[in-house]
Image (cartoon, rainbow, N blue to C red):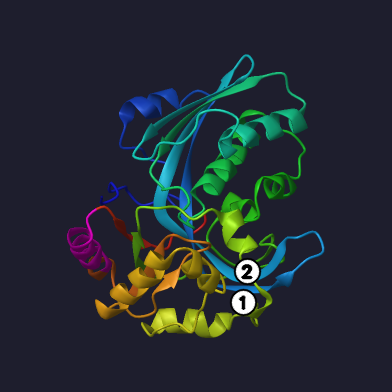
Amino acid sequence: MVLLKQTACPLKADGVSSQPSLNAILGSVDVTREHACAKLNLGLAVRGRRPDGMHRIHTVFASTDFCDELLVSIRPKGIELLVSGAVAVPEGEENLVWRAAALYLEAAGTEGGVQIRLVKQIPTGAGLGGGSADAAALLRALARLYPAELDLPALALRLGADVPFLLRGGLAEARGVGEQLRYLQPLQAHFVLVKPPFEVPTAAAYAALEERDYGPELDVAAILKALKQGAVPPWRNDLERAVFFAYPPLADLKELLENYGLAGVLMSGSGSTLFAPLASRGKAEQYANALARRYPGFATRAVSLAVAG
């Protein structure tokens, strides 16, 4: 299955919509629209395990132009989540978006409620931060609809380690569990994504780590320089050994992609998506289309990095 084409994630755009009726709706101060864009990990070093069981990491988060969309509106009370799009996800409390809404409304001390229409395109269990991006987008929306003096990054961290980054997006070096962020200069880069027809639970991936999987920090400067020059980045993902052991087809897929001519194939986050850099968007789209024909049932897509606005 080839993922449906989407327009570029408007992190730096002016909010112009291809749906005039939506623009009319958005004229109301009671309604706002947000894009929730997938991230890639341009390398992931696991540095060790903290006493609380969480792992210390060093990574480079990068927003892409592959996005979900949320239309968020005020309602008198309660939380209503309606989901459509290419990916089916729960509409109740088990959805991180629903929990983000409950967390914000309680912290803001408001009695009002919210309706969330989520158009879901980013696959789950893919290492792309789709659910986290949706939660971050919902927090941004509620901060406009129900303004309050809140520490939004702190709320975001309660929802997930990558949610603080996804509040702003762009390109950032991250440490701690992912919440210690140093934003970097924008980078133009293009990738092909390949997701096999199975998910990898993040918690299970980290639980399978052994001490031998821990490694030194990434050479971030060298990774970014290589991407700028079109060279193979010296990146790695310390989760790959444990995940590939649990999911052998993923290890096979990486080898197949390398044999197909892709250099620098890497797993994003805890998987199951693999990605590789290409010289141009056109080249990435050529690979995505060719791989879709070669591996029916796999989700393939060309993406480019997006710039935070």
Residue 43: image location, x then y, percent: 53, 73
The residue shown at (48%, 84%) is 234
Q: Is residue 254 above or below residue 150?
A: below
The residue shown at (63%, 20%) is 113
Magenta-highlighted stretch: main secondary structure? helix
For disc 2, the marked residue is 209
- 22 is within the stretch colored magenta: no
For disc 1, the marked residue is 213
Left or right placement of residue 270 versus residue 1 in this view: right
**Residue lying farthest top?**
76
Residue 202: image location, x then y, percent: 57, 56
Residues at discs 2 and 1 in contact (Cβ within 8 Å): yes
Residue 54: image location, x then y, percent: 73, 60
Quarter occupied by residue 16: top left
The one of 307 and 55 positioned closer to us in this rendering: 55
The amino acid type found where label 2 is placed reads: Leu
Q: Is residue 62 above or below residue 110?
A: below
Can residue 294 be spotted in the picture?
yes
